[in-house]
Image: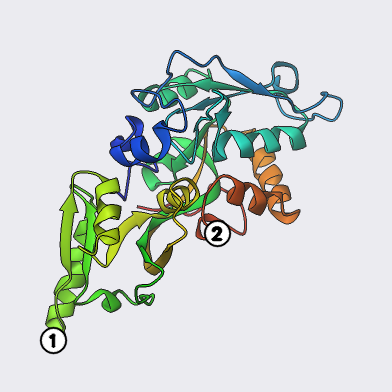
Amino acid sequence: MQHGIQRRRSPMWLGCSALLIALACGLAACSSGGGASGTTAPSSGSGGSTAKCHLPGNYCKTGLTVAVTEGYPPYSYQSPSGALTGLEPTLDKAVAKILDVKITFVPESFEDELLGLKAAKYSWVPSLNVTAAREKLYGFVSYVQDGSTFGTLKSSPSLTSNPMSLCGSTISDEVGDVALAQVDTWSQQCTKTGKKAITVLTFPTENAAFLAVESGKAQYTDTYLSVFGYFLATKGGGNWKLTGPKYGLTLVGDAFNKPATLAPYVEKAYNQLIADGQYAKIIKESDFTSANEVTKAQLNPPPGS
């Protein structure tokens, strides 16, 4: 899986990577292209009556319409029963309940989501990496963070937050992962200080990279926080732990057309969920790690790269 992604995920996610085929597609009806599967009609979550709704424009009357990319656990995917589930729809339903407005989810391809937003087809597009380039075009409300770290067996020595703790170790990763550039930089720093280099073994899938650790070929695997959380929850990863430095952390949020008049209301709703503890509960139940949590949703936060 490529880290440092343009959205919050690599193109592999959009077609269900081999890891997800192993972990998710046997559990859920995974879409084939990362967009609308053609098998799920738009689903709605009730926000209650509109008596308390005080949103701008016609939102109280028309409700909210949000695009989601299926086949992308743990952010959004179909449950074994075919229902839309994951962090995106669960959080958005909670937001709609606070705003007291109806919300409808429309399965959409990643490529077409922002086009649909520009055409005012959607109220917002969820779970985009917050970048400087994007903030020039869209308003944002961030509600989670994601990034890279390392996983290993509980029986293995733990790494520290210092990247130099990786010196002399063997790590596994998926071929083409852009995070390997950072690991290579750390490896060069290891050798410059008289320590052993970091050995990297690459595999065609992230699932194979995990198996390399289980078989003893590698000590650690480079992974994404959300991927690891889902792995632990669905693959019975009770013998695994997160360890080592977290890097490439990026805020993830909802994108709104400018002027983003709806965004402050959504920001306030997220922060209410954080304050009353619902947010942390949803994060856990959606198979994310506590490291994915943020302490505050932000309107147009400082962007990542």
Q: Which residue does the numbered mark 2 point to in the structure image?
A: 290
For the point 41% across and 27% down, which residue is it?
Answer: 30
Counting from the top left corner in percent of width and height, residue 299 is at 58, 47
Q: Position of residue 152 (x, y in %)?
A: 35, 65
- Residue at 53% x, 20% y is 106
Q: Quadrant of the N terminus?
A: top left
Looking at marks 2 and 1 on the same chain, the residue that comes earlier in the sequence is marked by 1
Residue 8 at x, y percent in the picture = 40, 43
Q: Residue 194: give its label.
A: 1
Residue at horizontal 54 percent and vertical 23 percent from the top: 82
Secondary structure at badge 2 equals: helix
95 left or right, relative to 22: right
C-alpha distance separating marks 2 and 1: 35 Å
Q: Tell me what residue is drawn at x 31 percent, y 50 percent.
A: 3
Q: In this view, does 206 lie to the left or right of 52?
A: left
Q: Is residue 269 above or below residue 83?
A: below
Amino acid beneath label 2: Ser
